[in-house]
């Protein structure tokens, strides 16, 4: 799991600095953000990538937990949209990066 988290966060933080997409609450006046995140860029969602990375790692080891873990990870991503921190595409790409990171880690760790 640690390797997958490291890979996903390197990808997320690299893409954030390349794309420089402002967060939705900065352009949508209806969003009421009292504590803005430290990072000003929204694309992709690091929280979503992290949640799905953890879910995928545990699900690979304990398949019976797959559904509950994926539901929890989904709600993490949904909460980021509702709070005005991310657009839906930010969350979708965060999910994709988690999956790609998981696959890369498997390739690196398996003989």
Image (spheres, rainbow, N blue to C red):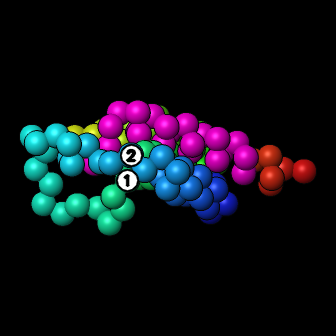
- Nearest the camera: 55 or 97? 97
> Total marks drawn?
2
Q: Are marks 2 and 1 in contact (CB under 8 Å)?
A: yes
Q: x%, y% of residue 64?
A: 54, 38
Check if residue 87 falls in the magenta segment. yes
Residue 41: numbered disc:
1
What is the magenta range? 85-105
Q: Earlier in the sequence, mark 2 or mark 1?
A: 2
Helix, strand or loop at label 2? It is loop
Crowdedness near tag 1: few (<14), some (14–19) or many (≥20) residues, C-alpha within 10 Å: many
Q: Which residue is mark 2?
A: 21
Q: x%, y% of residue 27?
A: 20, 42
Q: Is residue 77 left or right of residue 81?
A: right
Res. 85 visible in picture: yes
Q: Is residue 38 left or right of residue 44?
A: left
Helix, strand or loop at label 1? It is loop
Q: Residue at x 59, y 58 (%)?
A: 10
Check if residue 5 falls in the magenta segment. no
Q: CA distance from mark 2 to mark 1?
A: 5 Å
Q: x%, y% of residue 33?
A: 15, 54
Q: Is residue 92 left or right of residue 35?
A: right
Q: Quadrant of the N terminus?
A: bottom right
Q: Residue at x 41, y 33 (%)?
A: 89
The prevailing secondary structure element of the residues shown in magenta is: helix
- Nearest the camera: 51 or 88? 88
Q: Residue at x 42, y 45 (%)?
A: 43
In the rendered image, the residue lying farthest to the right is 111
């Amino acid at each position: 799991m640690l390797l997958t988290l490291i890979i996903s966060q390197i990808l997320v933080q690299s893409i954030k600095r390349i794309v420089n997409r402002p967060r939705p609450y900065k352009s949508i006046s209806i969003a009421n953000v009292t504590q803005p995140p430290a990072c000003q860029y929204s694309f992709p969602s690091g929280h979503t990538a992290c949640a799905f990375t953890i879910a995928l790692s545990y699900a690979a080891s304990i398949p019976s937990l797959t559904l509950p873990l994926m539901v929890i990870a989904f709600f993490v991503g949904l909460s980021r949209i509702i709070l005005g921190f991310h657009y839906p595409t930010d969350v979708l790409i965060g999910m994709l990066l988690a999956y790609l990171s998981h696959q890369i880690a498997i390739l690196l760790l398996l003989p």
